[in-house]
Image (cartoon, grey):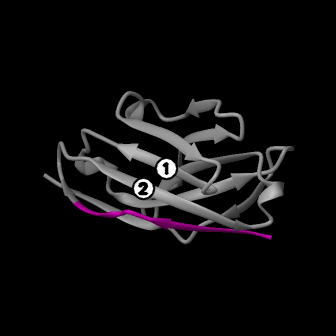
Amino acid sequence: QVHLVESGGGLEQAGGSLRLSCAASGSIFEINALGWYRQVPGKRRELLASITNGGNTEYYLDSVKGRFTISRDNAKNTVYLQMSSLKPEDTAVYHCYALDDTLYEIAWGQGTQVTVSS
């Protein structure tokens, strides 16, 4: 079983930056890729980005391309989301998730709140 724990959220002003971290533990060998999504209560979740064990990245949401960067430190079993030029509409709970080699979602974290004030 894979466990994911996010950190790094908080309150930031528009135009500012935050870096989220997600530490993975447990059955690390099951993980093929890690990623981030966000969700606002009452709305569908938005898939943001993913990164494979080999470092291949993919960004899914046009509104964050060029502003958000996903990276990982395999030695620390940690994935990061560097967020820059933050906007109030980025306010959400940010979750990390893990995929196995069949791209099946095998774990997700409890989330960390990001609030961007105007």
Residue 59 percent location from the top left of the image: 54, 32
- Residue at x-position 35% and y-position 44%: 83
Q: Amino acid at mark 2?
A: Leu
Where is residue 50, by image quadrant?
Answer: top right
- Mark with earlier residue (1, 2): 2
Classify residue 106 as left or right of residue 20: right
| Residue 48 percent across, percent down from the top left | 51, 42
Are the residues at dot 1 and dot 2 in contact (C-beta closer than 8 Å)? yes
Q: Secondary structure at mark 2?
A: strand
Residue 6, percent across and down?
50, 65
**Residue 7 inside the magenta-drawn segment:** yes
Badge 1: residue crowd in 10 Å (few <14, some 14–19, many ≥20): many
Q: Quadrant of the N terminus?
A: bottom right
Q: Residues within 10 Å of mark 2 (few under 14, many from 20)?
A: many
73 relative to 114, above or below: above
Q: Residue at x 49, y 49 (%)?
A: 80
Please, is residue 90 above or below residue 115 in the view? above
Question: Residues in magenta?
Answer: 1-11
Q: Residue at x 53, y 54 (%)?
A: 45
**For residue 118: magenta?**
no
Q: Residue at x 58, y 63 (%)?
A: 23
Spatial CA distance of label 1 from label 2 is 5 Å
Three-letter code, disc 1: Tyr
Labelled disc at residue 80:
1
Residue 96: quarter of image: bottom right
Q: Main secondary structure of the magenta part?
A: strand
Residue under pointer 2: 20
Rendered position, 26 above or below 101:
below
Q: Residue furthest right?
A: 102
Residue 47 lies, in percent from the top left, at 55, 45
